[in-house]
Amino acid sequence: VKMMMRNALALLVLFTSEAKAYTSSPSIQYLHGRAILQTRGVKTPLRMTGGGPTEGATRLGFLGMGIMGIPMAKNLLKAGYSVTVWNRSPEKCVPLVECGAQQANSPAEVVNQCDVTFAMLADPKAAKDVVYGTDDIQGVLSEIKEGKAYVDVSTVSDDCSRQICASIKEKGGRFLEAPVSGSKKPAEDGTLIFLCAGDKSLYDEVLPALNAMGKKSVFLGEVGAGAKMKLVVNMIMTSMLSAFSEGMALASSTGLQISDLLDVVDSGAIASPMFKLKGPLMNQGKYDPAFPLKHARKDINLALLLASQNELELPVSAAASQQYLKAEAKGAGGLDFSAVHRIYQDHQS
């Protein structure tokens, strides 16, 4: 547990820090004693044929054209990949088609046309609907076979990830979970962090595509480890922002200037790029969604479920979860997760 928390804190620092200068030099990173080759800046397209890569343009699929999916798929196009996209609301694919992507009518059609299919979906239910299909969706599984690979970059529970993995492998496909640390701006800038687990050979093969969308990738071992790491990181992040919001509310209610508070926080030991970015916007009541509050609440609740399964009490995170629930009840679910501060707006009026 201590090892996981140290790694989670390290990843949180990466997520909230300023993007470092672009470099194309490969380096070696170590996690849990495993040496992981990082090739930030190496974007040479690969073609997946059977079990290994050869030179040429990989046919990539991308399912889910939301706040994260659109910029991620755009970065794959910019890197020179052939990309086929799908979204339950077809009109959301238009920005990608205008950039050169092909649009498919179903997840199954994407898998049929592509070597590797990425999925960025809202929650475990959406992830399962897309894989297994529904009355109105022809699912991924109907076209998975040997030579096909599926990379789920959604934030889901570890149980959900293992279930999807087992189903993909049963049909002869390969699976990698790769949830991301980062929100809308890092997705646009290509500075996401991928928390990967599952098929190591697939990880090695899709690393150039991950590098087109992110600044760092780590391989954590067996399927489920990536999902758990993502939940730990997001639990820390959402709890931090809830406490920060309370601090702003207390400062305001006692007559202190929020601008002074932000300056003091930014100058001391608890300085954080997240606070520096979100603080002024929260003070102005600006909550344009980079990471929707409803998804933050979902993630912290999944983390609490994971804790319960491991017989661990997390009272701070449990209290933070209630604050996000209150904010969502006030209509903030579609706003940025910093809109948790709206529950204190009466104190700052």
Image: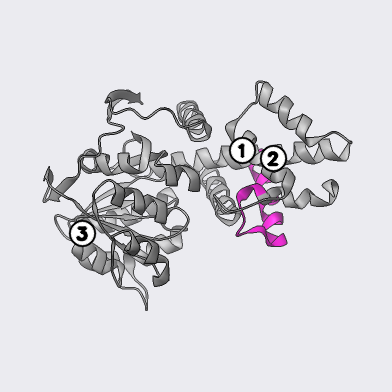
Position of residue 263 relative to residue 102, above or below, is above
Is residue 323 found inside the magenta-colored segment of the image?
yes
Residue 298 in picture, x, y percent from top left: 55, 54
Residue of label 3: 114
Q: Secondary structure at mark 2?
A: helix
Q: Amino acid at mark 3?
A: Cys
Q: Secondary structure at mark 1?
A: helix
The answer to whether residue 8 shows anywhere in this view is: yes
Residue of label 1: 277
Q: Which residues are magenta?
A: 313-338
Q: Residue at x 48, y 55 (%)?
A: 67
Q: Quadrant of residue 223?
A: top left
Q: Amino acid at mark 2?
A: Pro
Seen from the viewer's position, the closer of residues 86 and 238 is 86
Would residue 349 appear left or right of 3 to someone viewing this image?
A: right
Magenta residues, dominant SS class:
helix
Q: Earlier in the sequence, mark 1 or mark 3?
A: 3
Q: How far is mark 2 from mark 1, CA to CA?
A: 7 Å
Q: Residue at x 24, y 69 (%)?
A: 109
Q: Residue at x 53, y 42 (%)?
A: 234
Tell me the number on the disc at residue 280: 2
Q: Earlier in the sequence, mark 2 or mark 3?
A: 3
